Structure formats: structure tokens, C-alpha cells
Amino acid sequence: MAINIGIFICGCKGAVSGAIDMAGVEAGLTRVKKKIGAKIFHPWLCGPEGVSLLGDSIARHKLDCVIIAGCPETVHRDLFKRVAADSGLPPEMVIRLDIREGCALPHGSDPRGATQKAVNLIKMWNGQARLAEPYKPFYEDGNKDVLIVGGGLAGLSASLELAGAGLNVVLIEKEPFLGGRTAQLNKVYPRMCDARCGVTFLINRLRENTRVKIFNLTEIAGLKGSAGRFEADLISRSNFIDAESCTGCGKCAEACPVLVADDFNFGLADRKAVYSPWSPDPAGPYIIDRAACLSGCDRCVAVCPAGAVNLRAEPIHNVARIGSIIIATGWKPFAAEKIERLGFGRYGNVITNLQLERMMSPDGPAGGKLYCPDGGEPGSVLFVQCVGSRDVNYQSWCSAVCCAASLKQAIDIKTLYPNVRVYVLYIDIRVTGEYEDLYSRAQEAGVVFVRTSPAEIMPEPGGRGLLVTGEDTLMGRTFKVRADLVVLATGMQPAGVPGVIKEYIEGTDRGKGEGQLYSCGLMSQWGFFTGHKQCFPFEAMAQGIYPAGACQEPMDMGNTVRSALGAACKVLSTAGERLELSPFVPVVDKAGCDKCKRCMEECPYGVWYFDEGGYPVPDPLYCKTCLLCVGACPRQCISTQGFSVHKLAGAVTAKVKETGPGEPHVVAFVCENDAYQAVLLAARMGLEYPAGLHVVPVRCTGSCNMVLLREGLPGGIDGFMVAGCRSGECHYILGADRTEERLDNIKITLRDIMIEPERVIFTRLGVRDAEKFVREAREFVHKLKEIGPSPFKKHV
């Protein structure tokens, strides 16, 4: 506790002293003697003379805590902390109090009220300062283990980055091959390089890294624990051929009598039930698709010279103990057969853009040759854009990559087959940055662009071609084009998140109710993990779980790698050898804790767990320090070094006076991120509100424990205003929502003890809602005047 506090009041070169009677402030503080080592007034404390005075006073009076009343904390923050540090005072023992925007500017027409409010605030801040202590550094070893779900481009990129940083990586992929959709592509824009090149490089680097364990044919079947101490149950399906024994001779595939559609080539070719999933994968031996096998067939067993085939192999269960998880489950193409008028699935020469990728790939069904599936070589190719995308009947979002992908494919066709006519039917061409060059190159190559969404695709009567009809919206006329091959640019959909992870994140396995990701805006209505895009794009509500790649939103390969690196950075933030913890990490006083689990239930991020004694504790590496747990604890036994209920109580219980005859005394707890910015803006705009409203910024309104209100009103305070973030804008996801729920409950309690519930209001303010704040402050104070002063005032 601070035992020798210094109070420094700055005139701000007239900005404060011009509206506040400094002599009146001094007179109002005459009785504030306990633990006060110095009370100093200065016209310009941040000037050279004031800085020197501050440093000298700290040393001369041996002050262990300083209150600087003047401009807001964000102004000259580093200056005052540096002066304090030079004088041997820890920076956290410099407590700033805003009486410029807090008193002088909004109450210029009420100098008496502004002066008394300044005195009140200094007393309130002094009440908090008495409980201030220097921070004690605490350290925690970082987590070195991470699970990455998905072996596509995002998963491979994140794995390599994290393994290179010294982390132990478990990479799981449900398919028999690595590389995801990228492995199925031919060329990559804008350089037209081979898509396999980068993927093969990543796989080779990962295979040689001893910190990386790769599991194909593996899915996550269960997840428990919390950030920093996850336990993931992994199930690996058998490939029924022992990889170590297999020589890769291929005799098993030759003997297999079964042919099924090859899903790797999107049905353009067939494969055996025994097949090699992807030859460039260094660890891709032959595997057996048991679902396609004939009953009783064991020809592969009979012909295998190495005895590597085991048709009775069972799935393998493993448990991964990890600190963090990256979700990199990727995307899947829109099912084009849903749009019947476009003919996919009915006409063989209507294919998708991904089928064209496989067709044009050197290792594709035709060795990279352009052909019509129904036979022959095409003399004309027509691309249809936005198939499924930007359509309220299917998926209303733009898939971001389709335009550039079609331009790339059109350029490739014109380069290899100059005499082939190429058409692109588009709604809008959406290419940005350097990709605009693709549009120019396609035009120069002779690609014909028609702005339309085709009405119908039908077979040519008496011919082998296709007739495409529609309306050219630029020319204002209908058209009909004959094409030998039609390519549908299908949109991107999220491939989906493993159910156990989704349940864990949403909290359904912890009784929090389904759909929180949607209601909090962290998952779009279409299933993408959008996160809080402006501030926390990698947040998935449950800490330690981070999305990467196309499960966040439709994106090309470049943005996929960027997204993967961003997710890797989030993992690395908790992976150091020895990390210093935030002073705002909560600590539970076990002597007062009754293990009610309220803190665990109200934490938006799921970072709490039970220690060996059965007490709830947060993981300090993953805690977001929102302090909702402090506000939730019914026994007030959760605190931090930088914030506690008792410190706030020091402000609430301070002995203050009315700012004017009959003026209610109001305490306003406001969110420092949004609502407080609106309060500051109101002052700077010259907007006035009643001086009796005393603003106390807090980390999040969710950190305000209701005991402050329940005991503050009987203590003589006339009313409480609590101002949180606007709905959906809380930096801590649920902070303002939790506060609103608690206030609804506290009003019932107030009514039971014969206190008017109207003495407490909750409002939501954005950073620019200055006028709304002033309006609601005036209305609230007016309402309190109608109700009358607190009946407890005369007893205090």
C-alpha cells in the first residue's frame, strides 16, 4: 500500500486553471491529510520547470505514489513515467487523473461545479491510490506444443514457421495426401508458376524436421482442457498398407478389379480401390479405399511381394497434449449441379474450373491436354463467372479468387492454343492490385468479355456443342454463343470445422449454449471464422484456438500464406522460453473462494481451469485480461496487481460534496476503449453535462463488480451510470453484454431493499457517441432530481 502520496495539480497553461478555481481546489483538499506527502499546484507541469519540480518533489518527499491531476492519461504518458522512473518511482505508481476533459472543458459555464468536481475526483483517486502497490514481476514458461488441423497450404505454412521457431508441431490431415486444394491446381497466378512447386518444397522441409509429426487420414475426435493444456483425441484411419514394408511396386493396384471415380481429379478419370494418392508427396505410398472394395476380395493381399497389405487393420488412437491449436481446414467448391440451368452433371462438356485445373495439369488425366470430356478438341471455351457466388439463392458472398483464376486459365488456354476462341461471361471483374494485369493480358490475348449472367445452357440441336444464351447488360441486347466447352467458375465454401472443435469453441460442451460464434460476430452466417476482423481477426472466442487460411474467408494462395503466418504469430506470442505476465492477470484468493465456478462460466475465452486443489485459476499466457471474472465473482476474491474491486471501492466510498445545491452525486463507470473516448470527445467538442456526474474509466464494464453498486447506493451515492461498448463492438466480446445482464439482476435486488432501480442505468456508447453521452447524462441526472436524493445521504 502507498504510505506517502503526492498530489500534483496542473493548470495546463490555463486550460484547467481558466475554468477551475485552483485556490478552491486547494481549500477543498485541506482535510485530505492521511498519507499525503505533498500537495503541489503548478501552472504547467509538463513544461521543463514542472518536470523538474515533479522529479525533485518525488525525491525530496520520498513519495511512493503520485497522483497527477491535469490532462488525460494518454497525453504525456511517457514523459511523466520517465520522470518518475528517473526519481526511483515505478511507472505504475504514477496515477493520472483527467480534470481537463473531465472538469474544465465540459463545465466551463459552471466554475463552482467544475471546481468541486475536481476536488471530488482527487479524493476518489486518492482512495484508489492508497491501495496501489508496485507491480511484482511474474514469469511463466511458454508452451512449445501446437496442433495444426489441416494439411493444406495454410497448415503447411504455419507448421514450417512454428517448427522453425522451435515449437513441436503435430500436423493432421484427414485426406491421404498433403497440400489441400493447392495440390490439385495446375498453375498459380500472377507468375504462372507450377502450384506443386511450393507445396512440394513445404512438404519436404516438414518431413525432414524432427519437430514435426505428420498424420494423414487423421481427424480430431475429442477435445478437452483449455488453452495451454489441451488434450486432443486423434483417430487415424488405416491405409491398410504398411508404409515401411511397401516397396511401391504397384502390383496391388494392377490386381485390383475395382474402378471408382477419382475424386482427386474431380471425376474426370477413374482410379482403383488400391491407389497412390499423390505421387509428389514423399510419404505417399499406396493405400486402399476399403469402402470401394468388393466383398471378400483379397487379390491385393495375394500379389503383394512384401506382405504389406493388412485388410483387417484398425484405426489408431493417439492423444496430443498441446498448448495451442490452428484450424486450417480450408475450403470446398460450390456444388455446381445445384444450378440446373447451367447443365453441370447433365452435359459432359460443362465442367468446373477445378476440373479444368486437373485437365490442364501435366499429371492430370490427359497429361495437360485441353479436351472435351464427350470427345474431341474444343474450338471454343466459355467461362461462366460467379457460379453460386453473389447469388442470394445459394451463397451471397463473392468468392474473391474466381475472377483472377478464370483470367489465369483463359490466358493459359490462349497461350497453348492460340486458335481457340475464349469467352468470359461475368457480372463484374473483381481483380485488385497487381492482378489487374491479368485482365489486361487476357484482353490483349483476344479473350472476349461479355457482361451477363447466362440464362441457360443447352445442347446444340444436331451438333456436339453447347448454346449459351443471356442478356448483354452493357449492349442492352440478348445473345447466343456456341461453345464446345463450358467452364463454370464455382465459388468457395468453408470446408467445415471438426465438430468437436466447433462445439468446444461455441461452449456447447461447457453449457454455454449454441451459436455464440454467430451472435458475437466471430463466425459469419455462412460458416467462415471471420473473427473480430478490425481488431482481432484470429480470435475464435476460445483462447489458444486460431483460424488460418480459407476457413476465415475466401482467399487466394498469397493471402492464405499471410493468414497462416498471422495465426503462427498468435501461437508464438505464448511460446517464449520465459514470458513476463501482464499485471492484469487475475489471481484468486483461495481463502475466500468457494469454487462456485462463476469466473469459469463468464470468461468469454475459456482460459480457466481447475488446479490440483480444485480451485479455478486462469492460464496466464492466454488470459486476455478483460477482468470479467473480477466483475463476476460474488465473493470479490479475484483481483489483479493493476485492478481490484477494493481499489474501485476506494473511489466509490470517498467522502465527497455536492457540486451544487441539490445536484445528485453520480458515479459513471465507463469502458476505457469506447465509452470513455466518447466522454473525452464530448468535452473537446464543448458539450456540457451536469458536473455531478463523476466519470471513472475501467478496463471493461464487465470488470465492475455489482457489489460496488449494491453498497454504493446505501453509502450515499445518488445514482450509477455504466457505459459499455455498442452491441457487437466489445473488445472483449461479451463484456458489455455481461454487464447489462448483471445490472438487470441488481435492479431486482435494489427493489427488494427499497432502493429505486431507476438509480442505475446502463448505456452503450461508441467512440464517437459524444452527443448521445451528453444527452443520456442530462436525462439521467434530471431523472435523479425527480426521484430525489438518496435517503441514505443524511446517515453517511
Image: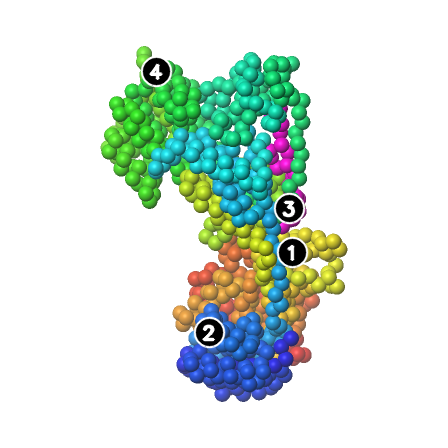
Say which of 501 and 738 sits in front. 501
Display coloring: rainbow
Instruction: Find disc 2 in the rendering and name its residue.
Output: 79
Can residue 723 be seen by looking at this rendering? no
Q: Amino acid at mark 4?
A: Gly
Instruction: Find disc 4 in the rendering and name its residue.
Output: 376
Q: Main secondary structure of the magenta part?
A: strand
Please, what secondary structure does the residue beneath circle 1 have?
strand
Instruction: Find disc 3 in the rendering and name its residue.
Output: 230
* Quadrant of the snapshot with the N terminus: bottom right
Mark 2 and mark 3: Cα distance apart in space: 43 Å
Mark 1 and mark 4: Cα distance apart in space: 66 Å
* Quadrant of the snapshot with the C terminus: bottom right
- Quadrant for residue 126, please give it: bottom right
Q: Which residues are magenta?
A: 218-240
Q: Earlier in the sequence, mark 1 or mark 4?
A: 4
Say which of 756 and 209 sits in front. 209
- Quadrant for residue 49, please give it: bottom left
Q: Earlier in the sequence, mark 4 or mark 3?
A: 3
Instruction: Find disc 1 in the rendering and name its residue.
Output: 618
